[in-house]
Structure formats: C-alpha cells, structure tokens
Image (cartoon, rainbow, N blue to C red):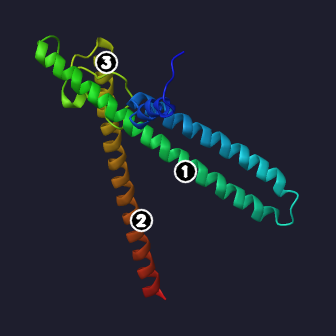
Amino acid sequence: MTAFPLGAADESEGKDEAIPSPAKRIRQLRDEAGTLRTQAETDYQTAETACYKRFFVNSCIDDAKAERLSAIRRARELEAEAHQLDLAERQRRAAEMAKKAEESGNGPRPTEASFPSADTDVTMPRTEIASPSRRATRSKSASNKASERARAARRAEAAQRDRERYEARIREIEEKKARDEDGR
C-alpha cells in the first residue's frame, strides 16, 4: 500500500481550485448564482408564510423582500462576472483563430467587427462572407429603414400642416375677439 503525505492530496486540489480554467470558473459562477436565486426564493416564501403569524405583517414581508433582493443582486453580480469571463474567453478564442487563419493564409480573415462583443451572444466568431439568407435579411433591413424614413417624413409633413392650421385658427379667433371688443 502506498502512503501519501497528509498535505499532498490537499495541495493538488488547492492548485486546481486556485487557477480554475475559464470554463470551469464561468460554470461555477453561474451555478452559484442559480443557487443563490433559488435559495433567495425559498427563504422569501418561508419568511412570507411566517410573517402572516406576526403582528406587523407588512413590515415583516418588506424585510423579507429586502433580504431576497439583496441575495438576487449578489446573484446578478455573479452572473455579470460570468458573462464578462465568457466574453473575454470568446474574444481570446476568436483572436487565436484569426491569428491561425492569418498564419496559414487559409480562408477569410476575420475583422475586428467579427469578434464577439458584450451585446452579442455567439459562440463562434463571424466571418466577412455572409450567407445568401443573411444578404437577403440585410437588403430587407435596408428597405425597412428606407420605408421607415419615408413614413417619418410623411409624419413630419402632416405635423407641419397641423401646426399651420392650428396657428391659422388661433389667428382667426384672435381677430374675431378683437372685432367683438371693438364692437362693444
């Protein structure tokens, strides 16, 4: 039987946990956030039920809501951190792929715009070559923008005509008032 020093197993586990891979860290943060959320909901429902047995029911429920909200805020912070790590990891992979493509000279070279950004949730970088369906979507989008601009111009013209009619009506009313005052 082989004997290991007591601290040897603990040291190897500590090293793995001290420098977790980004994917493990992201998964860990998301799991922790999910656990916090479910625990907050469970605690809130338990506290709310218990509050109905107390004299100051609304105050008790408000306190329970405040505790739930603080736990959910913490979960949101963890989810945001996980999202930032995920984004950084995707950008790193996209940069590596771009570097490999550039070195090998194969395929289209991704541009800076093709790297994932904070407002997109893609797992692979996009390339400059668009599929026919994407091109059709872009042309529809351009025609939608043009029709929206035309509608906006028509609305502006209608608003201008309405303003002019309103101002003309106000002038007529003021002139009529002036005539009536002179006739008294």
Q: Residue at x 37, y 59 (%)?
A: 163
Structural crowding at the residue carrying mark 1, measured as other residues with C-alpha within 10 Å and reported as few (<14), some (14–19) or many (≥20): some
Tag 1: residue type? Arg
Q: Nearer the viewer, residue 102 or 108?
A: 102
For label 1, the residue is 73
Q: Residue at x 22, y 16 (%)?
A: 129
Quarter location, residue 101: top left
Q: Residue at x 22, y 27 (%)?
A: 95
For label 2, the residue is 169
Q: Secondary structure at mark 2?
A: helix
Q: Secondary structure at mark 3?
A: helix
Question: Is 27 on the left-hand or right-hand side of 72?
Answer: left
Quarter location, residue 132: top left
Tag 2: residue type? Arg
Q: Earlier in the sequence, mark 3 or mark 2?
A: 3
Question: Is 62 on the left-hand or right-hand side of 5?
Answer: right
For label 3, the residue is 134
In x, y percent, where is residue 127?
24, 20
Q: CA distance from mark 1 to mark 2?
A: 56 Å
Structural crowding at the residue carrying mark 2, measured as other residues with C-alpha within 10 Å and reported as few (<14), some (14–19) or many (≥20): few
Q: CA distance from mark 3 to mark 2?
A: 52 Å
